[in-house]
């Protein structure tokens, strides 16, 4: 069986935790060996960079982009590639498409600059399947506000999150075969069912 990389994406408050639980349950049912990781982070140096990214008082958008890819490089080289080589699947809570959405669209750095770093750092370690948790940013932000203290990125205004949602939809249109778009405005049981259906649809080409 070929090892696979599955990524979870979405704007803030889109229900990635529910998606992650459902995804792991399904992989267990399929008897797949996998690791769960996240970005930014998932590795010692990458977690230190995550702290700078999420908790610095200020950060220039270009610095933010560079740090996202610096942490991603450590993550890919030290965690993702070795796991795939061992034959394990990798489930990553966010990955390179987040940089297209957040830095490319959200911070308005543009698609091309992110693509350059994608080619340079990620190369052919591209996801086999991406679950995009799609939510109206107004609903998503309400959900995260009820959770308490927001980090540096979560404190941005609503326009920023509209650009991100649009950025993800744009990326999904480029890769329709590997994207499953999940309507996360639905209730948790409905979202779980949508994810299970999407996974079953992709099962044949993944296994
Ligand atoms: P999390 O909330 O899913 O833990 O992700 C941390 C934050 O980092 C979230 O606001 C999205 C943001 N982010 C980017 O801006 N660009 C990226 O490339 C990644 C992976 C995350």
Image: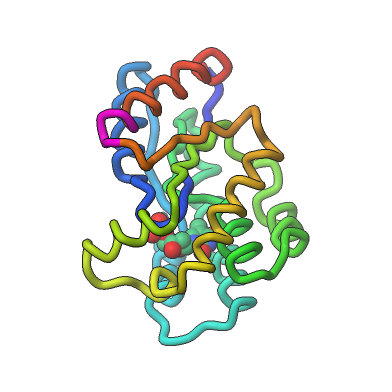
* Front-lying residue, 143 or 138: 138
Relative to 130, does residue 100 appear above or below in the rendering?
Answer: below
Rendered residue at 64%/27% (across/down):
177
Q: Is residue 184 left or right of residue 18?
A: right
Bounds of the magenta segment: 187-191
Is residue 42 a member of the stretch shown in magenta? Answer: no
Q: In the image, residue 22 lies at what x, y percent? A: 31, 31
Q: Is residue 43 visible?
A: no
Asked where in the image residue 99 lies, by quadrant, the reply is: bottom right
Q: In the image, residue 165 lies at what x, y percent? A: 54, 53
The image shows a total of numbered marks equal to 0
Q: Residue furthest top?
A: 204
Q: In the image, residue 17 lies at what x, y percent? A: 31, 45
The kind of secondary structure the magenta stretch mainly shows is helix
Q: Is residue 119 visible?
A: yes
Rendered residue at 33%/24% (across/down):
193
Rendered residue at 65%/46% (across/down):
171
Q: In the image, residue 184 lies at what x, y percent? A: 38, 40
> What's the colour scheme?
rainbow
Q: Is residue 38 left or right of residue 164?
A: left
Asked where in the image residue 72 lies, by quadrant, the reply is: bottom right
Relative to 48, does residue 191 appear above or below in the rendering?
Answer: above
Relative to 133, does residue 119 appear above or below in the rendering?
Answer: below
* Front-lying residue, 130 or 173: 173
């Amino acid at each position: 069986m070929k090892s696979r990389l599955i990524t979870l994406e979405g704007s803030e408050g889109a229900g990635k935790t529910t998606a992650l639980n459902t995804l792991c349950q399904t992989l267990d049912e399929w008897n797949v060996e996998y690791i769960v990781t996240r970005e930014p982070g998932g590795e010692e140096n990458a977690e230190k960079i995550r702290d700078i990214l999420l908790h610095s008082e200020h950060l220039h958008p270009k610095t933010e982009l560079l740090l996202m890819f610096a942490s991603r490089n450590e993550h890919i080289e030290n965690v993702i590639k070795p796991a795939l080589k061992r034959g394990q699947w990798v489930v990553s809570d966010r990955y390179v498409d987040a940089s297209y959405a957040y830095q490319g669209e959200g911070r308005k750095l543009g698609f091309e600059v992110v693509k350059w770093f994608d080619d340079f750092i990620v190369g052919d370690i591209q996801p086999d399947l991406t679950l995009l948790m799609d939510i109206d940013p107004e609903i998503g932000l309400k959900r995260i506000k009820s959770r308490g203290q927001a980090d540096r990125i979560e404190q941005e205004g609503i326009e920023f999150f509209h650009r991100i949602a649009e950025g993800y939809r744009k990326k999904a249109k480029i890769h329709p075969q590997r994207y499953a778009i999940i309507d996360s405005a639905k209730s948790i049981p409905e979202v779980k069912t949508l994810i299970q259906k999407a996974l079953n649809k992709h099962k044949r080409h993944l296994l």
